[in-house]
Image (cartoon, rainbow, N blue to C red):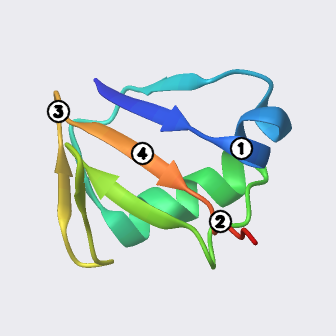
Amino acid sequence: MIQVLLFAHLREQVGCENLTIHNKQMTVKEFKELMEKQYKLSTQEVMIAINEEYATDSDVIAEGDTVALIPPVSGG
């Protein structure tokens, strides 16, 4: 299982703060496609972190990892 943490408006869109994905392994690109297809989340400007480290589309998410979807943050 892969734990998924959602923040800000992504949490509101899905209606919960975390998800469990039952895939054993996938790339970040495949993960983004899954989030877009299954949960209708736009991941174009979302940063992905695997186990608290930022990841690229080619990085691999493995069973037992925690993935965070971090939307852009603005402030003033």
Residue 51, how many percent across, how many down?
A: 19, 43
Q: Tell me the distance, in whole angstroms, between the alpha carbons under discs 1 and 4.
A: 12 Å
Q: Secondary structure at mark 1?
A: helix
Label 3 crowd bin: few (<14), some (14–19), many (20+), radius 10 Å: some
Instruction: Report the mark closest to the observer, 1 or 4.
Output: 1
Mark before the other along the chain sequence, 1 or 2: 1
Residue 50 shows up from this direction: yes
Asked whether residue 39 appears in the rendered view, the answer is no
Quadrant for the C terminus in the image: bottom right
Q: Amino acid at mark 1?
A: Ala
Q: Which residue is mark 3?
A: 63
What's the CA distance linking mark 3 and mark 2?
Answer: 29 Å
Q: Could you give the CA–CA distance between mark 1 and mark 3, rounded to whole angstroms? A: 25 Å
Q: Kindly identify which numbered label has been placed on residue 22.
A: none
Location of mark 2 (residue): 73
Asked whether the beta carbons under mark 3 and mark 4 sit within 8 Å of each other, the answer is no
Quadrant location, the N terminus: top left
Cα distance, mark 4 to mark 2?
14 Å
Identify the mark at residue 8; answer none if there is no mark.
1
- Image depth: mark 3 or mark 2 in front: 2
Depth check, mark 4 against mark 2: the one in front is 2
- Name the side, left or right, on which 34 lies relative to 56: right
Q: Nearer the viewer, residue 56 or 25?
A: 56
> Which amino acid does the dot numbered 3 rest on?
Glu
The local crowd at label 4, few if under 14, some if 14 to 19, many if 20 or more residues have their Cα within 10 Å, is many
Sequence-wise first label, 4 or 2: 4
Pointers 1 and 2 in contact (C-beta within 8 Å): yes
In which image quadrant can residue 57 be found?
Answer: bottom left
Q: Are there few (<14), some (14-19), or many (20+) residues within 10 Å of tag 2? A: few
The disc placed on residue 68 is 4
Q: Is residue 20 above or below residue 38?
A: above
Q: Give the x, y percent position of residue 45.
A: 62, 77
